[in-house]
Amino acid sequence: MNNIIKSSLENSMSYEAYRSLMLKLVEQESATGVDKSADKIDFTKLNNRRMKRWDKTLKIDNKSKKRLLDFNANVTWLVITESWCGDAAHVLPVLNKIAELNPKITMRVVLRDDNLELMDMFLTDGNRAIPKLIMIDNETGAVLDTYGPRPSEATYYVKRFKAENGKLTPEFKEDLQHWYNKDKGNTIIDDIAEMLSRFQPSFSQ
């Protein structure tokens, strides 16, 4: 196993510990990461509410459960995030539900700004974009695949908007939050099922 990945895993936390950290940050009027500006603190508060809602309401349908449970390799999902990241607030609860469903998957969480060497191994278009899931084979330590920072359909919307407008506007970011709420995690579930199928020859389609 790569030494940077190994060190990051050793310093990682469970999803439950990450959620407890977010609650503490909200109480302390703080945020993870180097930038603890008022914006980052406000986003942390908002994201805590979003994650609390998803943790309670997110459902995986029976067809998707069957696909996800067919995966039987022992893997660890090392997820890079920060408390203020809007995409992460929608993505991590879905990843956690999937990991809870399949006992072969262990999910661990690390903070980007505390693990920049790790982050720089998994850039997206040259950027330290989060959340980023790194799927590691528990037997060999090999990185099998990565996922993130956004679900496939949201990625398409973002790329199209950037191509037409140069950058993301506050209005677009708000529209993207509405998309996440309407999608209810289904695109992430489908994306992950497809990713897992690439490492499972008998995986049900």
Image: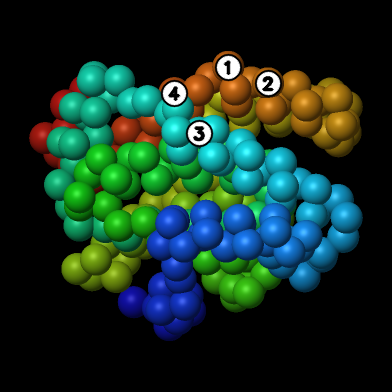
- Within 10 Å of the Cα at label 1, are there few (<14), some (14-19), or many (20+) other Cα atoms? few
For label 1, the residue is: 182
* Earlier-in-chain disc, 3 versus 1: 3
Residue at the limit of the structure toward the front, as seen here: 27
Q: In the image, is residue 67 above or below residue 55?
A: above
Mark 4 secondary-structure assignment: helix
* Residue mark closest to the camera, 4 vs 3: 3
Residue at the limit of the structure toward the left, as seen here: 202
Q: Quadrant of the N terminus?
A: bottom left
Left or right of residue 112, residue 62 in this image: left
The type of residue carrying mark 1 is: Lys
In whole angstroms, how far apart are the C-alphas of marks 4 and 3? Answer: 12 Å
In whole angstroms, how far apart are the C-alphas of marks 2 and 4? Answer: 14 Å
In whole angstroms, how far apart are the C-alphas of marks 1 and 2? Answer: 6 Å
Q: Are marks 1 and 2 in contact (CB under 8 Å)?
A: yes
The type of residue carrying mark 4 is: Asn
Could you say which disc has been placed on residue 54 in the image?
A: 3
* Earlier-in-chain disc, 2 versus 3: 3
Q: In the image, is residue 98 above or below residue 7?
A: above
Mark 1 secondary-structure assignment: helix
The type of residue carrying mark 3 is: Trp
